[in-house]
């Protein structure tokens, strides 16, 4: 069946360092979404990418959707302690409706 | 506008019992999905309902079931509880426009502990 993988599973960075998480799908996606879950919280939507090769930025966060629409990445520049949490990608596979498959997430720890 | 509401927030049950969790989606949202989250396991998809119909189902045993009412509120039921069912159960609603899902809005979750 369709799978969405994410690497790394865990990442510890020093505050100020950059961070990247990668998301890969076994099948072509119609779009991809990214969510952030703070410790003890619930996932919160960050962004949705739809077009092949699309790049979007939100302040220090840069999101990319691959040309083949099978992979995506989230890059955080100069991490801050407020970036701590688990980042999930969610691939949307178009069938008769959009089926959303969440990746396992990347847990980010930021050392002050 | 009110967010996704899940009740109860916390629940302690004994092995063998059954439990019903409730989710009220954002007004106007017709798609409701349920997820199980355990430490290190990410979000495991349980099922999705749209207009009272189950559209998709994850790989969970038949002890896990759900339903959606005409007002889009959804319930999930777990029968014959096992210790391994202890988890955070998250509900997410989304506004389905045409054939494209938009972002999912998650509730705070129900923390179920089975003892």
Image (cartoon, coloured by chain):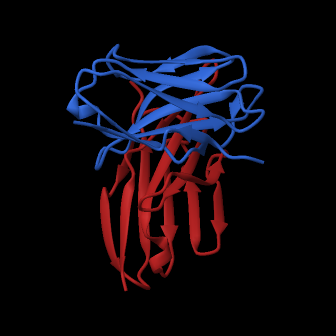
Chain colours: A red, B blue
Task: Identify the residue at image location x=50%, y=75%.
Answer: A82
Q: Is residue B82 left or right of residue A55?
A: left
The residue lying toward the viewer, choosing from B38 and B45, is B38
Which residue is more in the foreground, B60 or A106?
A: B60
Q: Residue at x 28, y 49 (%)?
A: B40
Occupied quadrant, residue B67: top right
The answer to whether A94 appears left or right of B64 in the picture is: right
Q: Residue at x 57, y 60 (%)?
A: A63
- Total label count? 0
Q: Is residue B44 above or below residue A44?
A: above
Specify the quadrant of the image occupied by residue A7: bottom left
Residue A95 in picture, x, y percent from top left: 59, 21
Residue B41 vs A97, above or below: the answer is below
**Residue depicted at 58% across the width and 75% down the height:** A60
Q: Residue A8's x, y, as percent?
A: 32, 58
Give the quadrant of the C terminus of chain A: bottom left
């Amino acid at each position: 069946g369709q799978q969405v993988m994410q690497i790394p599973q865990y990442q510890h960075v020093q505050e100020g360092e950059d961070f990247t998480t990668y998301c890969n799908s076994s099948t072509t996606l119609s779009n991809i979404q990214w969510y952030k879950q703070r410790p003890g919280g619930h996932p919160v939507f960050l962004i949705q990418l739809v077009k092949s090769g699309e790049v979007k930025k939100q302040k220090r966060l840069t999101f990319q959707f691959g040309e083949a629409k099978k992979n995506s990445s989230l890059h955080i520049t100069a991490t801050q302690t407020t970036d701590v949490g688990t980042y999930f990608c969610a691939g949307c596979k178009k069938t008769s409706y959009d089926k959303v498959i969440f990746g396992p997430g990347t847990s980010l720890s930021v050392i002050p | 506008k009110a967010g996704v509401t899940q009740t109860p927030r916390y629940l302690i049950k004994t092995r063998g019992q059954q439990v019903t969790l409730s989710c009220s989606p954002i007004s106007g949202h017709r798609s409701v999905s349920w997820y199980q989250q355990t430490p290190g396991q990410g979000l495991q998809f349980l099922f999705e309902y749209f207009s009272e119909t189950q559209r998709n189902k994850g790989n969970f045993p038949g002890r896990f079931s759900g339903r959606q009412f005409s007002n889009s509120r959804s319930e999930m039921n777990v029968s014959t509880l096992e210790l391994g069912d202890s988890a955070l159960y998250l509900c997410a609603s989304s506004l389905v426009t045409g054939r494209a899902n938009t972002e999912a809005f998650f509730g705070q979750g129900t923390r179920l502990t089975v003892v």
